[in-house]
Image: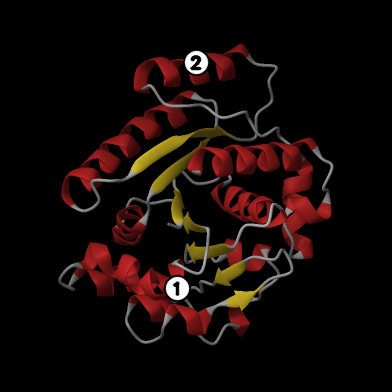
Amino acid sequence: MPRIVAIVNQKGGVAKTTTTASLGAAFAELGERVLLVDLDPQACLTFSLGVDPEDVPQSIHQVLLGKAKAFDTMIDTDDFVDLVPATIELTAAEAQLMTRPGREYVLREALKPVVDDYDWVLLDCSPTLGIITLNALTAATDVIVPMHGETLSHRALGQLLETIEEVKQYTNPELSVLGVLPVMFDGHYEHERAILDDITRTYGLRVWAPVPRSIRFAEAPARGRSILATDPQSPGAMVYRELARSLITTSK
C-alpha cells in the first residue's frame, strides 16, 4: 500500500516545502516511486522543482474542482519525482470547496486513480488549517510536522494535534503522526533543546534528528532542484537521506 504523508504545520516558514522536496528526492534516490502534490497557492514546491507556475496549463486547482484528472496534471522533474503542481488559482478553490458535499474527501477521491503507482505520496500543505489542509489530512495515511525549536512553534503544535484528533474522529480514523522534524536547527541554544525535549514529554511524539540551519536550502530553489542535487554531501541532505531510510524501514 502507498504511504501518503501530509507535511503540515499551520505556521509559515517552517520548511514544509523544503522537507517535501528533499524527502521526496531522498526516497527517489533509494529507488522508491514518489509523487509530490503541491497544495499551497504560493506554489513554492512547484517553483522549487524547476517548474514555472505561470506556465502550468492544469494544476491541483482543476483537480480539486473536478475539471481535470490528477494524472493529466503530472510533471516529471529532474529530481526523479512526479509532481502535481499548484498555481495561484488554488486560492479560489478554498471558497469553492466549502459549498460541496463531502468536501473533506475531494483530494482523497481525486488521488485514488494514481496513488497505487507510487510507494510514497507527499502532500505539501499551506500554512493554514483550512479546507484544503483538512483534505490533505483526510487523504493521508501519515503526518510529519516540521517545526522550529521555539515556544510559539510548540504552542502551534498543540493546536495542530487537536485538529488531527478531530480529523481522526470524523474523516480519517487511521491517520498516524510519524513525528516532529526539527528544522533550521542551530544547536547552540538550550531553549531549542528544551522545547524538543518537552514535545516528547508532553505529546509522546517521536522527534526526528534535526535538520541543521544552512543557506544551501535557500539556494537550491534558484536552480530548480532539491538540496540532494545541489549540495548532495551537505549535512542537511544527509539528514533527509537518513529520514527516508528510516521511514522505508519502518513501513515494511
Is residue 42 shown to the viewer in this render?
no
Number of disc labels: 2
User: In the image, residue 158 lies at what x, y percent?
Assistant: 33, 30
Q: Nearer the viewer, mark 2 or mark 1?
A: 1
User: In the image, residue 140 lies at what x, y percent?
Assistant: 37, 54
Residue at image x 64%, y 52%? Answer: 27
Please tell me which residue lies in front, 123 or 53: 123
5 in relation to 188, above or below? below
Residue position for label 2: 197
The residue most toward the front is 252
How far apart are the alpha carbons under marks 2 and 1?
A: 39 Å
Label 2, residues with CA under 10 Å away: few <14, some 14-19, many ≥20: few
Is residue 193 shown to the viewer in this render?
yes
Residue at image x 25%, y 51%? Answer: 172
Q: Secondary structure at mark 1?
A: helix
Residue at image x 79%, y 63%? Answer: 223
Circle nearer the N terminus (2, 1): 1
Q: Secondary structure at mark 2?
A: helix
User: In the image, residue 174 lies at what x, y percent?
Assistant: 28, 46
Judge left or right: residue 122 versus residue 156: right
Judge left or right: residue 155 versus residue 180: left
Q: Amino acid at mark 1?
A: Val
Q: Which mark is residue 10?
A: none
Quadrant (top left, top right, bottom left, bottom right) of the N terminus? bottom left
User: In the image, residue 199 lies at what x, y percent?
Assistant: 43, 21
Q: Amino acid at mark 2?
A: Asp
15 in relation to 223, above or below? above
Q: Which mark is residue 114?
A: 1
160 in relation to 121, above or below? above
